[in-house]
């Protein structure tokens, strides 16, 4: 009886170890919150009017916290998340400052690249514009289509970025580049009517070597009737953040599928 018990226990340990070999360990992911000047919200006027939120600093803190919490809820199986928005220690604040000082916010094509992003404005001239943007010696306007572009945190010093990641033992860094809630408050036609607002979160995901893994923006739609402050935090912001979660998890699923295919070959 004892021999059978030890045999079963041996098989349990063997298959448990086998299962652990097939499941990749959690990655360490730091979330860098958006900078205060990268916050644009057309709904703030509504929240001030109703008295739901009259302090922009409070909005910044609560929105950042809700984004991090929503990321944690969805990514916890694949990642250990570090919130750099929490200044619990001096060192954490220094690391956040280090990331801020090492990025330059610029427009970039969404990544992975899927569609052509630049378009030329049509002119009345029949002749083709020159590559330099001139026609018969005159400058012609060139328009960048921002539909398929996002605001990216471009890393300035890759060596310093890698050093910071090593010190924090990070595998990846997620930058929340900008929050913008866009709507038309100025139009007299929208006075007293329900109108659409768009929750756009620009984000970049880098690996520890400084390579861009994912870069995009969300496109969640809400309305001024539904987007009262706490409803916005608990529902609209969560829906927008879930678009980020899905983009990251899709990358992780791809990696899992690749690992499984490699295991089948062996």
Image (cartoon, helix red, strand yellow):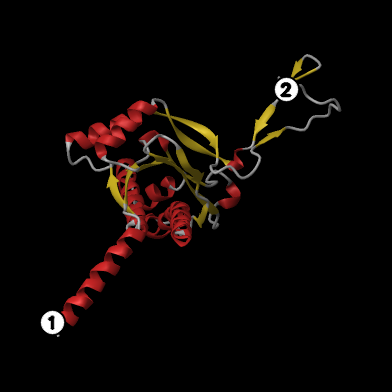
Does dot 2 land on a helix, a strand or a loop? Answer: loop
Against 36, residue 28 (above or below) is: below
Element at badge 1?
Answer: helix
From the image, tell me which residue sits under label 2.
131
Q: Are marks 2 and 1 in contact (CB under 8 Å)?
A: no
Which badge, 2 or 1, is on the more N-terminal residue?
Answer: 1
Q: Position of residue 191 (x, y in %)?
A: 55, 52
What residue is at 21 percent from the left and 76 percent from the top?
7
Q: Is residue 137 left or right of residue 15?
A: right
Task: Determine which residue is flagged by label 1.
Answer: 2
Q: Position of residue 30 (x, y in %)?
A: 32, 43
Report if residue 96 is visible in the image: no
| Picture residue at 54% right of the left edge, 35% below the top | 108
Q: Which residue occupies the foreground of this view, 46 or 28? A: 28
Q: Nearer the viewer, residue 143 or 256?
A: 256
Question: In the visual, does 66 lie left or right of 240?
Answer: left
* Circle number at residue 64: none
Q: Position of residue 151 (x, y in %)?
A: 49, 37
Give the residue furthest to the bottom: 1
The quadrant where residue 239 appears: bottom left
Residue 115 in view (yes/no): yes
At label 1, counting other C-alpha atoms closer than 10 Å, the crowd grade (few under 14, some 14-19, many 20 or more) is few
Residue furthest to the top in view is 137
Q: Name the quarter where the N terminus is drawn.
A: bottom left
Q: Position of residue 26 (x, y in %)?
A: 31, 53
In-image side of 58 versus 39 (left or right): left
């Amino acid at each position: 009886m004892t021999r059978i018990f030890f045999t079963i226990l041996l098989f349990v340990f063997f298959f448990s170890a086998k299962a652990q070999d097939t499941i990749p360990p959690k990655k360490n992911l730091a979330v860098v919150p958006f900078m205060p000047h990268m916050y644009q919200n057309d709904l703030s006027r509504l929240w001030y009017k109703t008295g739901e939120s009259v302090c922009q600093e409070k909005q910044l803190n609560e929105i950042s916290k809700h984004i991090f919490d929503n990321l944690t809820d969805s990514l916890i199986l694949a990642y250990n998340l570090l919130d750099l928005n929490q200044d619990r220690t001096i060192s954490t604040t220094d690391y956040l400052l280090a990331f801020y000082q090492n990025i330059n916010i610029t427009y970039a094509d969404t990544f992975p690249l899927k569609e052509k992003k630049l378009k030329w404005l049509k002119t009345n001239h029949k002749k083709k514009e020159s590559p330099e943007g001139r026609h018969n010696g005159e400058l012609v306007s060139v328009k960048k289509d921002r539909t398929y572009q996002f605001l990216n945190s471009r890393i300035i010093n890759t060596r310093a970025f890698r050093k910071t990641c090593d010190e924090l033992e990070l595998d990846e860094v997620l930058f929340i580049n900008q929050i913008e809630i866009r709507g038309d408050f100025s139009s007299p036609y929208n006075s007293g009517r329900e109108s659409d607002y768009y929750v756009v979160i620009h984000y970049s995901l880098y690996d520890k070597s400084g390579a861009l893994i994912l870069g995009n923006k969300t496109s969640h739609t809400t309305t001024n009737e539904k987007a009262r402050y706490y409803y916005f935090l608990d529902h609209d912001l969560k829906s927008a953040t879930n678009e980020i979660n899905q983009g990251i998890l899709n990358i992780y699923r791809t990696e899992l599928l690749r690992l499984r295919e490699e295991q089948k070959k062996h």
